[in-house]
Structure formats: C-alpha cells, structure tokens
Amino acid sequence: MLWLKAFHIIFVVCWFAGLFYLPRIFVYYAASEQQAVREQLAIMARKLYRFVTPFMVIAIALGVALIATNPGYYLTAPWMWLKLGGVAFLVVYHIICGRYVQSINDHRNRHNHVFYRFFNEIPVLFLFAIVILAIVKPF
C-alpha cells in the first residue's frame, strides 16, 4: 500500500505541475502581441497538455487502487467524498484546459491575459483543500 501511495503522490505532483504551468502559457499567449511568440506558446501548450494528461489518468487509477485496499473505510469517510469531489472538479478543469489549448492552436482564443491569470489560480485552491482533507481528515 505504501508503494501505491508513493506513486499516487508522485503522479499527482506531476499532474499539478502541468495544471500550474499550462494556464501560465495561456497568460503569456494572450498577453503577447508577436505572432511568432504566440505560435510557439500554442505549440508548447499543446505538447504540455498531451504530456500531463497521462499523469492525470495514472494518478486517478492509483487513487482508485488505494481506495480498493480498504473500501469500507475510504467510501464511508466524508473527507474522502469531498476529496473525490475536488478531484472531479480538477478533471473538468483539465478538460477545459484542453479546450483552451485547442482554441489557441486554432487561433480562436477569446480570453485575455487577465482572465487566464484568474483561471490559473483555481488549481492552487483545490490543491490546498485536497491535501488538507487527505492529511488532516477533518471529517
């Protein structure tokens, strides 16, 4: 179980690295006025999204495996359900990032850098909540 937990944490960290950096690329893209820079940032966003998506899938699979080690405990714990709700929200956030990557690469971006600056902060809030729920188990 400790190996599962260790690899779960590793892949969550890798996924979050992408969730933190990808919206930063969106900020730089929206703020740039140089077409060559925008093209390069669009490529970077597409490659990063493709790179971190498997981390999300593996992190979730390992999380499910951890729950399977003691479902009677985990599935009755209120903190776990809140954590899973946070993870579900982050999956939706990840998918929305994918849509933004697609719109940037198709030259259909409709958002400015201020929007992306606020959008960039969302995973930080969920990281705090999820880690506190998983470690402190307040409920």
Image (cartoon, helix red, strand yellow):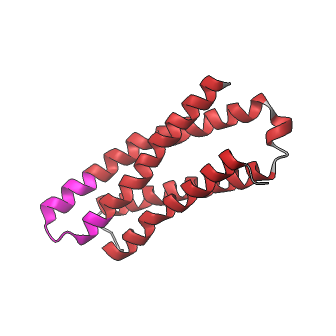
Instruction: Say which residue appears at 69% left-offset and 49% top-offset.
Output: 136
In this orientation, which residue lies closer to the viewer: 46 or 64?
Answer: 64
Q: In which image quadrant can residue 110 be found?
A: bottom left
Percent coordinates x, y for residue 64 in the rendering:
69, 36
Q: Reply yes or no: does residue 118 show up in magenta.
A: no
Compared with residue 62, is residue 41 higher up or lower down, i.e. above or below? below
- The residue under the point 32% across, 52% down is 45
Residue at 70% over, 32% down: 66
Q: Specify whether residue 121 is in view.
A: yes
- List x then y, in percent, for residue 6: 57, 29
| The N terminus lies in quadrant | top right
In screen coordinates, is 123 left or right of 79? left
Viewer-side residue, 1 vs 30: 1
Question: In the image, is residue 11 above or below residue 121?
Answer: above
Secondary structure mostly taken by the magenta-highlighted segment of the chain = helix
24 with respect to 91 (left or right): left
The spot of residue 73 in percent (x, y) is 83, 38
Instruction: Answer whether residue 32 is magenta in the image.
Output: yes
- Residue 105's quadrant in the figure? bottom left
Residue shown at the point (27%, 50%) measured from the top left = 44
Q: Is residue 72 above or below residue 24?
A: above
Q: Visible in this render: residue 87?
A: no
The span shown in magenta is 27-43
Image coordinates for residue 118, horizontal then vertical, percent: 43, 71
Question: Which quadrant: the C terminus?
Answer: bottom right
